[in-house]
Image: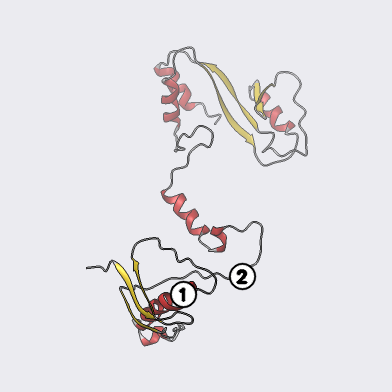
Amino acid sequence: MEPQHIIIRGAQQHNLKHIDVTIPRNKLVVLTGVSGSGKSSLAFDTIYAEGQRRYVESLSAYARQFLGQMEKPKVDAILGLSPAIAIEQKAVSKNPRSTVGTVTEVMDYLRVLYARVGTPHCPDCGTAVTPQSAQSITNQLAQLPPGTRFQLLAPLARNRKGTHTDVLMQARQDGFVRAQINGQLVDLTGDLPDLDKNANTTSNSLWIGWSYQKLPITRSSRVWLIRWKPL
């Protein structure tokens, strides 16, 4: 049966005075006290040191030669102790962009975890972001009530500076009559909009597409929607 507590008897490391402590396992335990009361002596120099020492002793002689074995702490007995891991408080290089994830070097592992098992959601509406095929998009449009007006838009320029005149002219030649720039619809049949060439497209988002008024979806119109690929 797995022990439920870590039992420490006669801890004498550093300024500890033969103390006896019982700590519950599988719990979040906090050691508090004034400076010099023995918090680090108990946590790092006694519990962690003994757990690490026992773990290293369980390895082969070949493996032990590559690991620095800690000295046995001054304690009468410790029961219910497992191999321990400690993150000590040390001075690190100061960087205003440092976070708990970067300092503890777990950020890369968290990225992999979230990418593998997480489900991204839209920050605006909270809808789950899932892969969509042309067929699934067509099915969603078919569920709209007749007469619903909607737009199909696709981004043409991202993270690029410039006026994007060539992109807008090509879109107009391809039959597109409207573009969405920075959230505003722009008519492409007249003079092209004058964009700031030094502005990044992350602030002047350039999208292109067509406006529609939904009519009853027939088999032929469903096939046409699937074949249409402005996205």
Other-residue count near label 1 (Cα within 10 Å), few / some / many at <14 / 14–19 / ≥20: some
* Quarter location, residue 187: top right
Q: Where is residue 142 shown, x and y percent of the image?
A: 42, 20
Residue 44: which disc? 1
Image vertical order of residue 166 relative to residue 16, above or below = above
* Quarter location, residue 90: bottom right
Contact flag, marks 1 and 2 (Cβ < 8 Å)? no
* Quarter location, residue 207: top right
Type of amino acid under label 1: Phe
Q: Nearer the viewer, residue 160 or 49?
A: 49
Other-residue count near label 2 (Cα within 10 Å), few / some / many at <14 / 14–19 / ≥20: few
| Colour scheme | secondary structure
**Where does label 2 land, which residue?**
91
Q: Where is residue 116 shown, x and y percent of the image?
A: 43, 51
Q: At x 49% / y 12%, what residue is drawn?
A: 147
Type of amino acid under label 2: Ala
Q: At x 53% / y 29%, what residue is drawn?
A: 229
Q: Where is residue 81 shown, x and y percent of the image?
A: 33, 74
Q: Under tag 1, what secondary structure?
A: helix
Q: Under tag 2, what secondary structure?
A: loop
Q: Nearer the viewer, residue 4 or 200?
A: 4
Q: What's the CA distance linking mark 1 and mark 2?
A: 17 Å
